[in-house]
Amino acid sequence: MLDRLSSSQEDLESEELREDAHASGCTRISECNDRQIVRVTGTLRTVTLRPRAGVPALEAELFDGTAPLDVVWLGRRSIVGIEPGRKLIASGRISVSHGRRVLFNPKYELRPLGQE
C-alpha cells in the first residue's frame, strides 16, 4: 500500500499496462526478440505520418509498461481508431531496426473504449 502511495502516476500506469498484458495472454514487449511472431498489447503513445522510401507510412509507438514498440502500417496515411491514448492488441513478426523493436503491417484489434 505504501509503495502505491509513493509511486509516480507514470509508474502506476506502467504497472497497470503490464498487468493488462499478462491478463490478456500477450507477450511483454521487453521479452520480444528479432524475427519472433508475437501478440502484444498496450497503449498508443504517439501516432505520426512519416514517409518511408517515398511511400506514406503511419507510425505509432505502442507501450505496454515494459518497453516501447514501433508499429508501422506502410501505404497508409490514417486508420480510423488509431490515435494516441487508444489501447490495442497487435500481432505479427517483430524486427529490430536501429536498436528499436518494429512491427510492420500488423494484424490489430482496437480495445473497446469502455476498457480504457
Image: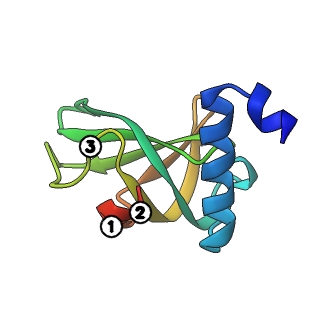
Q: Which residue is mark 1?
A: 112
Q: Earlier in the sequence, mark 3 or mark 2?
A: 3
**Colour scheme of this structure image?**
rainbow
Q: Secondary structure at mark 2?
A: helix
Measured Cα–Cα span from mark 2 to mark 1: 6 Å
Residue 111 position by quadrant: bottom left
Pointer 2: what residue? Answer: 115
State the residue at coordinates (61%, 29%).
9
> Residue at 15% across / 55% down in the picture?
80
Tell whether label 1 touches label 2 (CB within 8 Å): yes
The reply to whether residue 75 is visible in this rendering is yes
Q: Is residue 96 left or right of residue 77?
A: right
Give the amino acid type for the residue marked by disc 2 in the picture: Gln
Q: At label 1, which amino acid type do we have? A: Pro
Q: Position of residue 75 (x, y in %)?
A: 18, 49
Q: Amino acid at mark 3?
A: Glu
Residue 20's place in the image compared with 102, above or below, is below
In front: 55, or 42?
Answer: 42
Image quarter for residue 46? Answer: top left
Label 3 belongs to which residue?
83
Q: Looking at this view, name the residue that lies furthest to the right.
A: 2
Q: Residues within 10 Å of mark 1 (few under 14, many from 20)?
A: few
